[in-house]
Structure formats: structure tokens, C-alpha cells
Image (tube, helix red, strand yellow):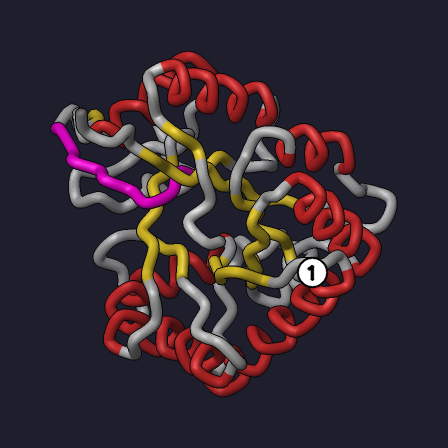
Amino acid sequence: MPDSPQIDLNADLGEGFGAWAGAGTDEALLGIVTSANVACGFHAGDPVIMRRVCAEAVRRGVAIGAQVGYRDLVGFGRRRIDIAPDDLAADVLYQLGALDGFARVAGGTVGYLKPHGALYSAAATDAGQAGALVSALLAWDRPLPVLTLPGSALAIAAAAAGLPVVVEAFCDRGYRADGSLVPRDQPGALLHDPAAIADRALAMVTGAGIEAVDGSRLDVRPGSLCVHGDTPGAAEIARAVADRLTGAGVRLAPFVP
């Protein structure tokens, strides 16, 4: 009998700041997901939030990933910043070090890296920005996996440098026919119905294919599924996805030990 399929379920966590802590959503999601992309203080997050999320992730056996971004608290990291590659690499190392410190205090460690927002999009197509991320990871004390889109500039650069690459899919986002995400300011970019998102997640994992915004079929075979933590009803969506997958015999497990 073939082995049951397995998938990682990740979400962006720790995206509060100061009085806007987002603790309730973080705690709810940490009871569902298997990997937590933790904001490192540049696009969101602060030391208190980072420490709290890391401690809870370790307690629940959830893998900790560094969600690094541009230095853009006001814009939530969703504005592209024209930054020199060497400066970006330094910013990434700064964020990695900060989060890893809190992870280690909690008894864990940072297990992977995922860019956030505008940096995620830039690293998908810009070889310079992707190279800066890879440069930071090569300077780190261990080869962290990179979580990114399949075929992205970051995936290509990381693989060429010998870094592990895990491709992800977004079950709550719309896709273009070429496999890229629909920009957030365009129709069809965001999905909101938990049941429809859950069905889409299962189709992604089983290789059934999904429908792109132009009506064409798209084959998506991820190593990890993402549910956005800042989406209204994020915990309800994540629970629907997890229940739909496990109900179909899919095992949820992090892609890093």
C-alpha cells in the first residue's frame, strides 16, 4: 500500500508591533500549522512578540522560520525598496540573528528562511535581490532551507549555491497561468471562503491541479502550503485546510526536523 501523502502547512506569524500584538491569532494558528514564518522586526514584529511566538512554537513542536523583509514597518514590508545587495544581505543576517536568539532561548532554533511581501516578490524575479538572500544564508552558520515559489530566481540561486529549496503554494491566493501570484491590487488576488480554500489546498497536494484566474489549469505540487496569518479569519481558514487534508489521509508535518 503506498505511503500517505505528507505536506507542511505554514503561516506568517508574529506580525504585530507594540500594542498591536495579534496574540490571539498567533496562538490559534500555532495550534494548527506545522511551520511558523516569524516576522523578525523589519516589516512587523518586536522583541516581545518574537520571544513569545518562538516559545509557543517550540512548546507545540512547530518549526520556526525567519520571515525576513525590507525595513518597512509603515508599509508592512509590501513596498519594494531599492537597496544595494550587500546592504540587503546585512539586513537579512541581522533579522536571522535576532530571531535565532529568541528561538534558542526557547529551546529551539531557526530552521528555514522565507522572504516577506515585496522582498518575496522581488526575489522571485530579480537575480540581484535573490543573490543577496543567498549570500546571507551562505554566511550563516548552517545551510538553512529556503521557502519560495517554484522556478523563482531565489529558488534557482539557492539551488545553485547548494542550499535546500522547498517550494510552496498559496491556497488562499489567486494564480496567473504562468504560476505567478495575482498582485494584491488586482481582482482574484485573495480568496476568502474557507471551504473553497480547503478544497484548493487538497487539489494542490494531490496534484489534481487548480484553476488560474484566466480559467486555465495549473499544476501545483508544493512541499509546503501557506495560509496568510494577516487575512481576516486566518485561523478558521487554516483549520478548514488542516481538517480537509487530514480527512483525506494527508499527514501534516514540518519539512524541517
Magenta residues? Answer: 217-225
Q: Is residue 192 above or below residue 93?
A: above
Quadrant hosting residue 209 = top left
Q: Residue at the front extreme?
A: 1
Q: Position of residue 141 (x, y in %)?
A: 53, 81
In percent of the image, x 59 and y 53: which residue is there? 64
**Label 1 environment density (alpha carbons within 10 Å; few <14, some 14–19, many ≥20):** many
In percent of the image, x 28 and y 28: which residue is there? 4
Residue 29 shown left or right of residue 49 in the figure: left
Q: Position of residue 28 (x, y in %)?
A: 68, 28
Q: Residue at the left extreme?
A: 216
Q: Is residue 213 visible?
A: no
Q: Is residue 60 above or below residue 124?
A: above
In percent of the image, x 48 and y 34: which residue is there? 227
Q: Is residue 241 above or below residue 130?
A: above
Residue 47 within the magenta-colored segment of the rendering: no
Residue highlighted by disc 1: 103
Find numbered disc 1 in the image and state the secondary structure of the residue it sits on: helix
Residue 221 within the magenta-colored segment of the rendering: yes
Q: Position of residue 74 (x, y in %)?
A: 69, 55
Of residue 246 and residue 210, the one placed in the foreground of this image is 246
The amino acid on which the numbered mark 1 sits, given as a three-letter code, is Ala
